[in-house]
Image: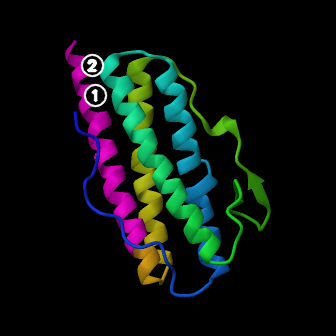
Amino acid sequence: MKCINELPYPAIMVEKPNIDYAYILLQDYAGAISETTAILMYSYQKFLNIEEEFTKTIRTIAITEMHHLDILGQLIYKLGLNPVYKTLQSNNNNMLPWTSDFVNYNTNLETILKYNIKSETNAIINYKKHYELIDDIYIKQNIARIIEDEKVHLKCFNNLLEQYRKK
């Protein structure tokens, strides 16, 4: 199963520094639904060696998520903020550190796949919200490209779930 999007990535640049935009991107960088969470969750799932097709797929997806983390980190830095593994609380200006409590440690393949589908769906929803909040053409291009990858990941997890249910 091919779980890689072959489209090129746009240049990693910003129109001008903007701390507000950086804080928005920190949510995608190190929030509960973030690239950091996805990378560590998928890495954990890969170690389980549940099923060969799943293990190969999850490794490929985790590598793509690492690329997203790099893109976001560079954008956050260019916007004028240190890309730390923290994010703003939604109800105040306190920074919350990323925590491993964000990772789902389930070991059942069907449950994992359902959770990963939900996670990728939520990531797409968040990225779309952030796309609307940010008025910087370069950041929007990067977010749009990342969304395309997340859609591929969603399709792959749905295909794996369908295959699993047929067994």
Q: Which amino acid type corresponds to the residue marked 2 in the rendered image?
A: Tyr
Give how far across and how far down residue 167 sits, in percent: 22, 12
Color theme of the render: rainbow
Q: Residue 42 in magenta?
A: no
Q: Residue 149 in magenta?
A: yes
Front-lying residue, 127 or 68 = 68
In the image, farthest residue toward the top:
167
Q: Which residue is mark 2?
A: 164
Q: Which residue is mark 1?
A: 160
**SS class of the residue under badge 2?**
helix
Front-lying residue, 32 or 91 = 32
Q: Is residue 107 left or right of residue 157?
A: right
**Residue 11 picture quarter:** bottom left
**SS class of the residue under badge 1?**
helix
Q: Residue at (71%, 41%) from the top-left corner?
A: 99
Q: Classify 10 Å Cα crowding around label 2: few (below 14), some (14-19), many (20 and above).
A: some
Q: Residue at (39%, 24%) from the top-left corner?
A: 55
**Residue 131 picture quarter:** bottom left
Give how far across and how far down residue 165 sits, in percent: 25, 18
Q: Is residue 33 visible?
A: no
Q: Which amino acid type corresponds to the residue marked 1 in the rendered image?
A: Leu
